Image (spheres, rainbow, N blue to C red):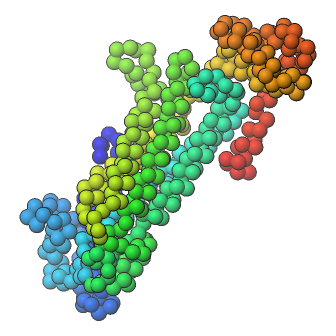
Amino acid sequence: MVPRYARPAMTAIWEAEARYRIWFEIEAHATEKLGELGVVPESAAKALWAWWDTNPAIDVAAIDAIEAVTKHDVIAFLTWVAEQVGDEARFMHQGMTSSDVLDTTLSVQLARASDILLEDLDQLLAALKRRAEEHKYTPTIGRSHGIHAEPVTFGLKLAQAYAEFARCRDRLVAARAEIATAAISGAVGTFANVDPAVEAHVAEKLGLAIEPISTQVIPRDRHAMFFAVLGVIASSIERLAIEVRHLQRTEVLEAEEYFSPGQKGSSAMPHKRNPVLTENLTGLARMVRSAVVPAMENVALWHERDISHSSVERFIGPDATITLDFALARLTGVIDKLLVYPERMQKNLDRMGGLVHSQRVLLALTQAGVSREDAYRLVQRNAMKVWESDGALSLLDLLKADPEVTAALSPVQIEDKFDLDYHFAQVDTIFARVFGG
C-alpha cells in the first residue's frame, strides 16, 4: 500500500488492529456457541465478552513479539488474548483450525471493502449521469480508429461510461455475495471437532453466508472471481481515463482535466496543462489488474490445504482494494470537474469539410437507384479530394458539382444529407435505455 494512493476508510480495514479485532469476534462468537452446545463452559464466552466490553486496545507490538517466538500468527494472538482474559481463555479455538479464523476474516475484510467500493461506484455514476444530462445534445465527432467517423453527442459518450460502470456495480454486488462466506469447519473441513452450528452462528453474527463445503480453506475460486471483477472495474476506469487523455491532446482539446489556480504542469515549460490525473488512473488500473493472475493461480492448492495463497493475499487484498478505492474517487473528481469545450467540438466536427456526412449521401444515392458500388465510388472520389486538401475543400460543394451525383440527387436533396441534427434523433431513446424513464 502506497500512502499517496490510499484513503483512510479503506486503509483502516487492512490495519493489523482491525484484523485482530475480527479474529477476536470470530473466536468469541464461536466460544459462545460452543458454550450453548455444552462443549465448553458458558462462562468462557462471558469472560471474553466482558474483557471486550472494556474496549481494550489491541497491542499489535506485543502480539508480534510473541509471533517472533511461535512463528505462528494465530497462536501468537491466542496467547496474547489469554494473557489479558485469564484462565477462561483456554476454551477459545476449540475444534478450530487457523484457516477458520484467517479465511473468515478475509471474507469480512473483502465484504467491507466491497461496501466502500460500491459507494465509490455510486458517486461515480451520479457524476456521470449529471454530466451526461448536461451535454445530452452537445455535438461532437465520433471517432473510429482515432479517425473522424460520424457525429455523436458528448452526452452519449458519458452515457456509455455510465452504462459500463453500472454493469461494473452489478458485477461487484455479485462478487461481494460470492466472497462473503464463513468457514468454521476445523482441520480438513470435516467438522470432526466442531459442530456446524458453530459455523452458522459465527456467519450470522458477522453477516456472512456459510461455506457449503470447505477443505480447511474457503475455495479460492471465490477469491479469483472477486479480484477478476476488480480488474474489470480497473479496465473500465482506464478506458474512460484514456478517452479524457485523448480529448485533452492539443490537437483535439475538446475537454480537459480541471486545472486549479496555482497548479503547475511542467518544471520546464510554464505553458503545460497535462492530463496527469487520468494518466495516473491508467497506471493505477494496471496495478489493480496485476492482482488478477495471482488470484487465479491461488485456486490450485495442494489437496485440502496449503499456504501458497497466503502470502499472495497479504499483498493483493489490501493493495487491490485500496488502489481501486482511490482510483474510483479520483475518476469521480475528474468527471465532476471536467472542463468541456463545445465550441472546439463543433470546430473539430467542421474540420474536414463535411466528410462526416458521407454515409448519408451514400445511402441516399442507393435509395435513388444507384448501385451501392457506384454510389460508394462517387462519394469516395469526392471525399478523397476533401481529405487530401486537409478540409480546405467542401464535400457538399464537390458533390453538387459532380454530374453523376446530381443525375440522381438534386442540390436540395444533397444539402439535406448534411443536417447535423439528423444524427441525434435517437438520443432520447438511448438515454431512456441507459437511465430509465
Q: Position of residue 275 (x, y in %)?
A: 45, 27
The residue depicted at 51 percent of the width and 21 percent of the height is 249
Up the image or down, 78 lies above or below 168; here it is below
Q: Residue at x 23, y 69 (%)?
A: 56
Q: Tell me residue 15's x, y (percent).
A: 28, 56
Picture layout, residue 51 above or below residue 430 = below
Is 288 or 188 nearer to us in this picture? 188
How many numbered marks are there? 0
Q: Position of residue 140 (x, y in %)?
A: 66, 26
- Side of 61 relative to 185 (left or right): left
Q: Quadrant of residue 157?
A: top right
Residue drawn at x 37%, y 19% is 266
337 vs 280, left or right, is right
Identified at 40% across, 14% down, the residue is 270
- Residue 181, image x, y percentages: 41, 69
- Identify whether 91 is placed above or below 7: below
Could you say which is closer to the camera, residue 224 or residue 84?
224
